[in-house]
Image (tube, rainbow, N blue to C red):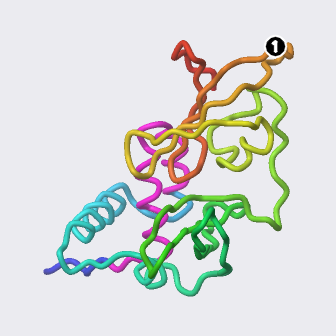
Amino acid sequence: MPSTPIRITAREFQLVLLRRMADYHPELVEQARRELDASVTEMREVNAHWQRMQRSRSYRGGLSALRGFLGAPLVEEEQRLGDVTCRISRWKLPLWPDLLFEALTGIGTTVLAEQLVRDPACPPPRLENIGDLTPWSCVIGDVERAFGPVRHRDGSAPSRWTTDFTAPDAEGKPVAASAEFVWGLLQSVRGIDGRELR
């Protein structure tokens, strides 16, 4: 009996986001997968389907694809970045109620960046020192606000991002650190010596 064709909705889209985070904290991904009532097999099949779809010559991607997966954005607005006017579209995802999934598009509907961001309607976490930076506790913008100025670097994959910054430790001593994010959500924090701090 043929299997049911996979359709990407907000639920499956969240499984795709989780797969990229599993390399860092499989225990958090496991908990989130259970919240979505998805089996390990289903998560694997959804991600295999996603990869096939991304490689397909017929797949156009972009903002129209995200609309097809997630529905109409909760918010759409224009923002000036240098000499370019970009469009920001944001959607609510159940797994992260205090966050929004944001897509930044330039000319046309090409997506330039995708990440989880803080919902303006929700208060940011209290970040006072390195110890407050626990996995999944904050997004890139939260670290910028708490410990700026920061320096951003591309990560090892399109969904990954690294941010260098300085923050106090528990005794108030400044510590130079690098935070790793997947889809904008904090995964780990390391010192400049490579030692994992959180």
Looking at the image, which residue sits at the far left?
Answer: 1
The residue under the point 70% across, 50% down is 141
- Residue 98 coordinates in the image, percent (x, y): 73, 61
- The correct choice, above or below, for 103 with respect to 33 in the image is below
Q: Is residue 15 left or right of residue 181?
A: left
Q: Is residue 127 above or below residue 49?
A: above
Q: Which residues are magenta?
A: 7-33
Circle 1: element type? loop
Above-or-below relation of 85 to 146:
below
Please state which amino acid type lies under the numbered disc 1.
Lys
Residue 163, percent from left and from top? 59, 37
- Is residue 12 on the magenta stretch? yes
Q: Position of residue 59 (x, y in %)?
A: 26, 77
- The quarter of the rendered structure image containing the N terminus is bottom left
Residue at 60% in and 67% down: 83
Which is nearer the eye, 12 or 42? 12
Residue on which the image places disc 1: 173
- The residue that appears at 79% across and 65% down in the rendered structure is 120
Q: Residue at x 67, y 30 (%)?
A: 165
Q: Locate the C terminus and report the quarter of the image it occupies.
A: top right
